[in-house]
Image: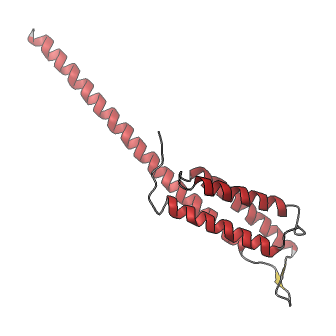
Amino acid sequence: MDAALAGLIGAGIGAAAGFGGSLATSVLTGRRMREAWRLDQMIVAYGKTLKHLTRAAVPRGELTANGAFVLTKDDVRSLMLDLADAEHSLTLATGFCGPLAADEMTAALSGLSVLVRSVAPGPNNARGSTDLTQELWRIQESVSKCVQMDVGRGWKGDLG
């Protein structure tokens, strides 16, 4: 074999190996960056969800002599906004959650959506405010468990 041809073949093999190594490094770095971005988004989404659920569940209104809360017009408006924020942030968190939490997050979102629809027409709904508050705390607890499953255990997303 001619020395020039051998040098050319060697250079081609070296170039292909260098290109392959660069490509593999680039793909792996991109994957790690997407995983880090997804984890950041998941943490933010969970944080907002828990904040909005907690804010919606906190009793508001005027306390009556028998211990019940009566909602004023402003209280109803702020409750509806808090519920809308909670539903929106829970939807985003459900999209970012990992496979361990997916079923529970979907159930929590479904439960919150039903709850929001049941109170959306106004404060004179079939459910009492105590039921509303208890249901919001139940959903908040469910999302908290999902945070522990996803973020607490260091879930790595399947980016296929």
Residue at 50% across, 56% down? 40
Residue 140 lies, in percent from the top left, at 65, 67
| Left/right of residue 19 with respect to residue 86 in the rendered view | left
Which one is in front, 143 or 96? 143
User: Is 44 rendered above or below residue 51?
Assistant: above
Asked which quadrant contains residue 89, the reply is bottom right
Q: Can see residue 52?
A: no
Residue, far right: 124
Residue, far top: 2
Q: Can see residue 22?
A: yes
Asked which quadrant contains residue 67, the reply is bottom right
Residue 29 lies, in percent from the top left, at 37, 43
| Left/right of residue 102 with respect to residue 24 in the rendered view | right
| Left/right of residue 156 with respect to residue 53 in the rendered view | left
Asked which quadrant contains residue 120, the reply is bottom right
Which one is in front, 124 or 26? 124
Please identify the quadrant where the N terminus is shown: top left
Which one is in front, 121 or 109? 109
User: Is 61 rendered above or below residue 51?
Assistant: below
Residue at 79% across, 65% down? 80
